């Protein structure tokens, strides 16, 4: 995916966990990824080696814990209008996240897959990507990928590559940025890098999480789909050149 800190319209640039129990989330992800946390009014930023890598925020009452992928935009209000015009919904109007952290909004595509919009000011997205314990990839899942592709092309101008294993990669400024995949349920998946996927899965279990699939080999690395101890699903993917260990 495009490198952290560079602005690209429509690129997955940030991930955030909506949770009713941020203390519980800090214990789980601090234990899994060695993240540290910076408390801001109404919001928590997870850091790795001093770089911002993810957010924790209060989720809607009764919604359960869930990871959300945010897409970079130059103008959150203008993009929210384009979402409506393309047949999607705006779930939360653009709002200021925090001083110098820009603006955000929440939206849903025609199939109901929820995603965020992030308009940076000084903030330009995750400070680390494609590393162990950092955000690596996002996929939009849809039972109707043709409609999904048309929606995201209209809103963000995505260009698509050749479909492989039921997933169609999208490119932004010529760079691979994510994929749209045929799945029974609509949503955006979030993937984090792991130095050793099997070790990471053991850590997930030890911290009270569960394993939904894998670990199994893929062309991109050894992969497992897991849930944290509050039920939020995410994917772990082994990075061939990974050197960083998980939390000791």
Image (tube, helix red, strand yellow):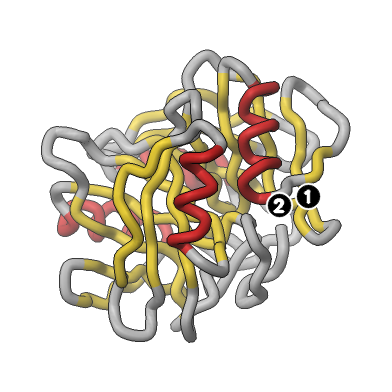
**SS under mark 1:** strand
Q: Which quadrant of the figure contains the N terminus?
A: bottom right
Question: Is 205 rendered above or below residue 177?
Answer: above
- Side (left or right) of 160 relative to 203: right
Q: Is residue 42 found left or right of 236 in the rendered image?
A: left
Q: Label 2 near label 1: C-beta < 8 Å?
A: yes
Q: Can the viewer see residue 62 in this picture?
A: yes
The residue that disc 2 covers is: 177
Horizontal and vertical percent position of residue 215: 58, 31
Residue at left offset 31%, top offset 70%: 97
Secondary structure, mark 2, is strand
Q: Which residue is mark 1?
A: 171
Q: Nearer the viewer, residue 243 or 101?
A: 101
Query: In the image shown, does 182 or 127 lie closer to the viewer?
Result: 182
Q: Quadrant of residue 40?
A: bottom left
Against 73, is 215 above or below? above
| Vertical placement of residue 214 versus 13, above or below | above
How busy is the neighbourhood of tag 1: few (under 14 within 10 Å), some, or many (20 plus)? many
Q: Tell which circle, 1 or 2, labels the residue nearer the N-terminal end.
A: 1
- Residue 205 seen in the figure: no
**Residue displayed at 66% across by 75% down:** 6
Residue 194 to residue 127: above or below: above
- Please give left or right for residue 199 compared with residue 94 in the image: right
The C terminus: image quadrant: bottom left
Q: Where residue 217 sits in the image (x, y, percent)?
A: 71, 31
């Amino acid at each position: 995916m495009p490198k952290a800190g560079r602005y690209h319209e429509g690129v997955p640039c940030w991930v955030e966990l909506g949770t009713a129990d941020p203390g519980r989330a800090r214990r789980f992800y601090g234990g899994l990824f060695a993240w540290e946390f910076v408390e801001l009014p109404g919001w928590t930023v997870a850091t790795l080696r001093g770089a911002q890598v993810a957010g924790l925020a209060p989720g809607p009452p009764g919604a359960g814990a869930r990871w959300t992928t945010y897409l970079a935009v130059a103008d959150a209000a203008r993009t929210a209008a384009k979402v409506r015009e393309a047949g999607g919904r705006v779930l939360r109007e653009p709002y200021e996240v925090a001083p110098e952290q820009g603006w955000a909004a929440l939206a849903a595509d025609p199939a109901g897959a929820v995603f965020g919009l992030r308009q940076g000011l000084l903030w330009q997205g995750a400070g680390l990507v494609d590393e162990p314990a950092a955000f690596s990839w996002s996929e939009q899942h849809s039972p109707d990928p043709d409609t999904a592709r048309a929606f995201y092309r209209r809103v963000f101008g995505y260009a698509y590559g050749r479909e492989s294993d039921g997933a169609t990669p999208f490119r932004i400024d010529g760079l691979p940025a994510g994929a749209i995949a045929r799945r029974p349920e609509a949503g955006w998946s979030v993937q984090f890098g792991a130095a050793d996927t099997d070790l990471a899965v053991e850590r997930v279990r030890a911290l009270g999480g569960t394993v939904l699939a894998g670990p199994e080999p893929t062309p991109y690395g050894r992969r497992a789909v897991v849930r944290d101890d509050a039920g939020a699903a995410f994917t772990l993917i082994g990075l061939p050149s990974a050197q960083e260990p998980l939390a000791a």
